[in-house]
């Protein structure tokens, strides 16, 4: 198994609305500092927090699939389809941009914290589809708790969100001292952000994981399993995304 760990200093940064909304960008826009250019069809991942009420004005998207996952606070969405919706703690907004859509976002409470994640489906196919918007409250996502670990499925499997891109997404919360195992597939890559606390990953050796680390793990053989161990005092919360290394179509050159 291979594990790459990128500290916050190795990732990109961004800001909107005059610096009212600040972002850590694990996977950034072309020409910007970034940990990695992409992880398979996962090609943009920003994690931001509102220092004040903030807005991002109307702007276009086409073909890509965009997920906004709200960690806490209140996020508003409006678009050229006529949508005007808000989502709060643990909810998600999904744009399948298809043939094209304009949208705007607003962070209506100070301290609102969210991730925006862009996935790349087969562009020559999705660009022919009409754009669509969907949103999901926290209660819509299946969540399982056991042995000090809560596993929430956000995309794929039993989750209500299913994209054209072959992606799975999870919200893992480990109580202090808890351990968690995730089986890896050699044909896929697992990327994750440590958004709370700290701990370690075990892959033959113990590798420390700290708050804000971005990690990419991949199996080198069938049966490889990622072992996570939370700190005894702080615990650890991780947002994880599992995607194919080769989705079976040509990926856009950023």
Image (tube, grey):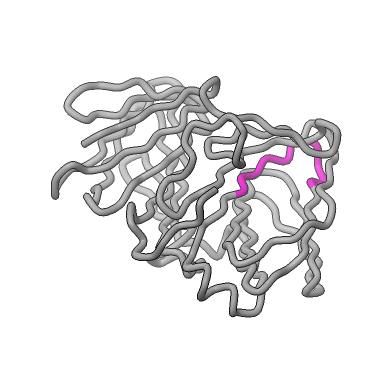
Give residue 186's position: percent from left, percent from top: 22, 50
Q: Residue at x 33, y 56 (%)?
A: 246
Residues in magenta, as a range: 107-116
Residue 129's quadrant in the figure?
Answer: bottom right
Q: Image quadrant for the N terminus?
A: top left
Q: Is residue 106 above or below residue 48?
A: below
* Horizontal relation, residue 56 to residue 206: left or right: right
Outermost residue on the front side: it is: 253
> Is residue 98 visible in this depiction of the protein?
yes
* Horizontal relation, residue 226 to residue 154: left or right: left
Give residue 229's position: percent from left, percent from top: 31, 29
Outermost residue on the left side: it is: 222
246 inside magenta stretch: no
Q: Residue at x 84, y 46 (%)?
A: 55
Between residues 247 and 25, which one lies in front from this camera angle? Answer: 247
Q: Residue at x 84, y 34 (%)?
A: 52
Count of numbered tags: 0
Give residue 107's position: percent from left, percent from top: 79, 46
115 inside magenta stretch: yes
Between residues 252 and 16, which one lies in front from this camera angle? Answer: 252
> Is residue 162 visible in this depiction of the protein?
no
Give residue 106's position: percent from left, percent from top: 81, 50
Q: Is residue 223 above or below residue 175?
A: below
* Horizontal relation, residue 12 to residue 217: left or right: right
Q: Residue at x 35, y 20 (%)?
A: 208
* Horizontal relation, residue 6 to residue 33: left or right: left
């Amino acid at each position: 198994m291979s594990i790459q760990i990128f500290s916050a200093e190795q990732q990109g940064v961004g800001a909107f609305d005059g610096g009212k909304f600040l972002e850590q960008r694990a996977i950034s826009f072309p020409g910007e500092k970034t940990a990695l250019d992409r992880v398979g069809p996962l090609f943009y991942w920003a994690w931001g927090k509102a220092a004040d009420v903030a807005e991002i004005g109307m702007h276009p998207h086409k073909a890509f699939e965009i997920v906004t996952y709200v960690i806490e606070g209140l996020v508003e969405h409006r678009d050229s389809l006529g949508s005007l919706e808000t989502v709060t703690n643990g909810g998600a907004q999904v744009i399948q941009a298809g043939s094209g859509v304009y949208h705007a976002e607003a962070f209506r409470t100070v301290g609102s914290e969210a991730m925006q994640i862009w996935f790349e489906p087969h562009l020559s196919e999705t660009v022919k589809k009409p754009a669509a918007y969907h949103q999901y409250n926290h209660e819509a996502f299946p969540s399982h708790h056991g042995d000090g670990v809560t596993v929430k499925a956000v995309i794929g499997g039993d989750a209500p969100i299913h994209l054209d891109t072959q992606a799975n997404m999870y919200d893992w919360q480990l109580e202090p001292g808890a351990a968690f195992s995730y089986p890896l597939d050699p044909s896929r890559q697992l990327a994750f952000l440590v958004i709370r606390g700290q701990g370690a990953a075990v892959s033959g050796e113990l590798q420390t994981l700290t708050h804000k680390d971005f990690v990419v793990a991949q199996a080198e053989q069938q049966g490889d399993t990622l072992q996570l161990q939370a700190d005894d005092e702080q615990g650890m919360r991780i947002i994880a995304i599992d995607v194919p290394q080769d989705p079976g179509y040509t990926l856009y050159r950023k």
